[in-house]
Image: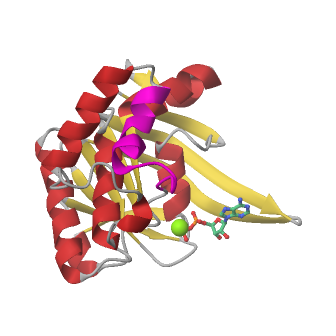
Amino acid sequence: MVRLEKVRKSYTEKGRTVEALRPTTLTLEPGAFVAVVGPSGSGKTTLLSILGGMLAPESGRVWLENQSLYDLPLRQRTQIRRQRIGFVFQSFNLIPYLTALENVQTPLYLAGVAPAEQQRRAETLLRRLGLGDRLRHRPAQLSVGQQQRVSLARTLANDPALILADEPTGNLDPDTREHVLHLLESFRREGRTVVMVTHDPAAAARADRVLRLADGDIREAA
Ligand code: ADP
Ligand code: MG
């Protein structure tokens, strides 16, 4: 379970303060597929970064599986981020000189998994995502949709409890977009919590729950 407790974050720049996230209390159940929508500058990335253990709130607590993320020493928080949280980026962030297989192995390597096991798990995931015949290809040799699937396989590598996706369908053609949404839905069926920032109303409609951000305020959309 993921819980935000009175979490607040503002930025001050050149003497001006922006309330990026106003005090927010929120519980996300395991197996929830949550869409976050709202105009540019409304606080979506701030929310995702706080959930992902990457940005400390000014006040309040963030709980992931009964641990208060920002009360932990940095080293332990990094460990949790690597082991329990998966990120999906619009730009995929694949490493260009590594093969699909090696890209998916990277988080396992960082988590200290033995090489043979890294490869076995990465291969299983890529096959599950329909890329069994693309294991040794580099990102540039793959279509955009295939690159996104490699990035989703990498997200799953550590079996994360929480998946954070920032505009995961933004650059995709309709077929690939559908495929990605379908995969996110299947992650939720495995009991993972999926939080997806999106500008796409059709993608948001696939979620169980829609959170609408406006000027750092979160509202539950009906
Ligand atoms: P969104 O992802 O919805 O576009 P953000 O979370 O990126 O919104 O930003 C929310 C608000 O916080 C915006 O007004 C933005 O300009 C401001 N902001 C975000 N990051 C910083 C930063 N590092 N320094 C100063 N202001 C920031
Ligand atoms: Mg953003």
Image quadrant where residue 89 sits? bottom left
Where is residue 132 shown, x and y percent of the image?
17, 50
Image quarter where the C terminus lies is bottom left
Image quadrant where residue 18 sits? bottom right
Image quadrant where residue 55 sits? top right
Residue 118 located within the stretch drawn in magenta: no
Q: How is the image coloured?
A: secondary structure
Residue 147 in the image: above or below residue 27: below
At 61% across and 21% down in the image, what residue appears? 75
At 66% across and 42% down in the image, what residue appears? 58
At 63% across and 51% down in the image, what residue appears? 9
For residue 160, side relative to residue 17 (left or right): left
At 17% across and 77% down in the image, what residue appears? 175
Decide if residue 222 is in sight here: yes
Displayed-image quarter of ligand 1: bottom right
Where is residue 188 shown, x and y percent of the image?
17, 47
> How many numbered marks, from 0 up?
0
Residue 100 located within the stretch drawn in magenta: yes
**Helix, strand or loop for the magenta stretch, by majority:** helix
For residue 10, side relative to residue 42 (left or right): right
For residue 58, side relative to residue 155 (left or right): right
Residue closest to the eye, 75 or 101: 101
Residue closest to the eye, 137 or 89: 137
Where is residue 80 shown, x and y percent of the image?
46, 27
Decide if residue 35 is in sight here: no
What stretch of residues is rendered in magenta?
94-110
For residue 176, side relative to residue 7 (left or right): left
Image quarter where the N terminus lies is top left
